[in-house]
Amino acid sequence: MTSNRQQFGRICALLAVAMLTATTQVSGQDATTAALRNAARSIAAGNLESAERELQSVLRNRPGDYRALDLMGIIRVQQHREPEAEEVFQQAIRRKPDFASAHVHLGLLYVQTGRQADAVPQLREGLRIDPTRTDASAALVYIWRDAAWVAALWPRACLYGVVEIRGCSSAVRTIHRAAAG
């Protein structure tokens, strides 16, 4: 049975292979694109060591390549190194702010680590850049559905003493702020 992290990494890697294949068809084959495609395939196959070696090679030759950084972030998620994954995704975004994948992957990392309020702006930006990103829209639906459920139940929980009444209004405001973006 695969874990959510493994599924996250494989899905992201398969999407990266598809994107890199489409890019290659438009711009022609080059060594960097081939290495990135090989790394994405290795991630999808669960061979993180091979993928990391390939990406390290790309980053030695092209420091700051936003695509390599994005794939490295996926590897870090797979390795349960979330703080490093967050930093690598942020580096990719700094290098190319209009790269939808890095925004979406950072947003999905935030969802996975329970940081929905941080996830919403990243997922929204990914969708603004690339409206076809169904992974981002599905994650936003999940966040908003969860926030609506919590917001609907929270007042009852306060009334029945499940939580302190003092915390109710601030928690509901936090939920609404996250959903509103």
Image (cartoon, grey):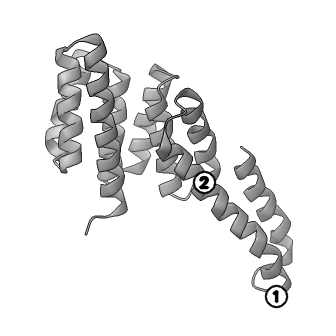
In percent of the image, x 29 and y 49: which residue is there? Answer: 10
In percent of the image, x 19 and y 51: which residue is there? Answer: 46
x and y, in percent, of residue 60 in the image = 22, 20
Which dot marks residue 160?
1
Q: Secondary structure at mark 2?
A: helix
Left or right position of 126 against 58 = right
Closer to viewer: mark 1 or mark 2? 2
Left or right position of 8 against 60 = right
Left or right position of 151 against 139 = right
Identify the image quadrant of the C terminus: top right
x and y, in percent, of residue 66 in the image = 38, 24
In percent of the image, x 30 and y 33: which residue is there? Answer: 18
Q: Nearer the viewer, residue 40 or 79?
A: 40
Is residue 23 placed above or below 138 in the rendered structure?
A: above
> Residue 156 appears in which quarter of the rendering?
bottom right
x and y, in percent, of residue 127 in the image = 56, 35
Q: Nearer the viewer, residue 39 or 73?
A: 39
Which dot marks residue 141?
2
Q: Secondary structure at mark 1?
A: loop
Left or right position of 160 against 77 = right
Nearer-N-terminus badge (1/2) = 2
Labels 1 & 2 near each other (Cβ < 8 A): no
Near mark 1 (Cα within 10 A), the count class, few <14, some 14-19 or many ≥20, is: few
Q: Tell me the amino acid under the disc marked 1.
A: Tyr
Q: Tell me the amino acid under the disc marked 2.
A: Val
Marks 1 and 2, how far apart at CA: 29 Å
